[in-house]
Image (cartoon, rainbow, N blue to C red):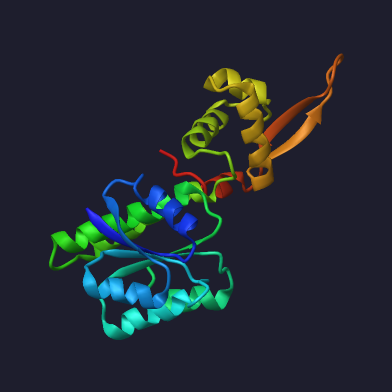
Amino acid sequence: MLSVLIVEDDPMVAEMNKFYLEQVEGFRAGDWAASTNEALLVLEQGDFDLILLDIYMKESNGLELLSEIRHRGIKVDVIVISAASDKKSIQVALQNGAVDYLIKPFEFSRFHAALNGYREQNQLFRSQERLKQSDLDTIRRFRKEQRVSQELPKGFTRQTLQTIWKVIESSGVEFFSAEDISMLSGISRVSVNKYCAGLVEMGVLEMDYVYGTVGRPVQKYQIAPNGRKTISKYITPN
């Protein structure tokens, strides 16, 4: 079980981070600190594997804590969780060894991916004295795959997107409607409509209205010229 120190000056946010943390297998919240000085005292008294670190705190700056940790040679990893999205803060955090950086607000899936990736890395370091290049490449590939879901539009899931995309590619027709995909995939037309609209915004599909002899025009979709390349950023085809 990996022990985590939460450094966050807002008690409600700290409690929320603790709740999220304990939804991920292999982690427990070991303690909480509300400032840089308090965090350093806690680190002197106990061992932690990981720190979830905020940058903007009333009495201190999280980047100062990160720098001090490195200066003192404290062996602990850090994932920054902060509303700070400016280039300088992110660069300083990464240059000082933060293993990941999450910008608030973030989806739980992104938080989950960061912890899963860290756990895999930690397990590898604990189990082997020497690593091969393939070991490091496996970690990087795993972390990249785990982060895919956070790139999706809000309300999308990777599994549903993969299912819809498979049906689109295997349908064998150039133009199709949401109803066509719904019938072939077994996914509700409402959901398929939402995903098709999202795929249009992502540049994966193109949409046009087709007018029949009677009735209202029907929305028809086709794969955009760079659609297959674009979709590869969001899913890993089987």
| Residue found 36% across the figure and 82% down from its top | 68
Name the outermost residue toward the top: 214
| Residue found 57% across the figure and 30% down from its top | 168
In the rendered image, which quarter contains the C terminus? top left
Q: Is residue 96 visible?
A: no
Name the outermost residue toward the right: 214
Left or right: residue 82 versus residue 196 is left
Left or right: residue 71 versus residue 11 is left
Name the outermost residue toward the bottom: 71
Q: Position of residue 41 (x, y in %)?
A: 30, 75
Residue 130 versus residue 181 in the image, above or below: below
Q: Position of residue 147 (x, y in %)?
A: 44, 52
Left or right: residue 13 versus residue 119 is right
Q: Position of residue 60 (x, y in %)?
A: 48, 78
| Residue found 57% across the figure and 25% down from its top | 171
Q: How many marks?
A: 0
Q: Position of residue 183 (x, y in %)?
A: 58, 17
Residue 16 versus residue 177 in the image, above or below: below
Left or right: residue 213 versus residue 19 is right
Q: Is residue 95 visible?
A: yes
Front-most of residues 120 and 41: 41
Front-most of residues 148 and 169: 148
Residue 231 versus residue 214 in the image, above or below: below
Residue 103 versus residue 226 in the image, above or below: below
Front-most of residues 178 and 105: 105
Front-most of residues 94 and 41: 41
Which quarter of the figure has residue 14? bottom left
| Residue found 68% across the figure and 29% down from its top | 175
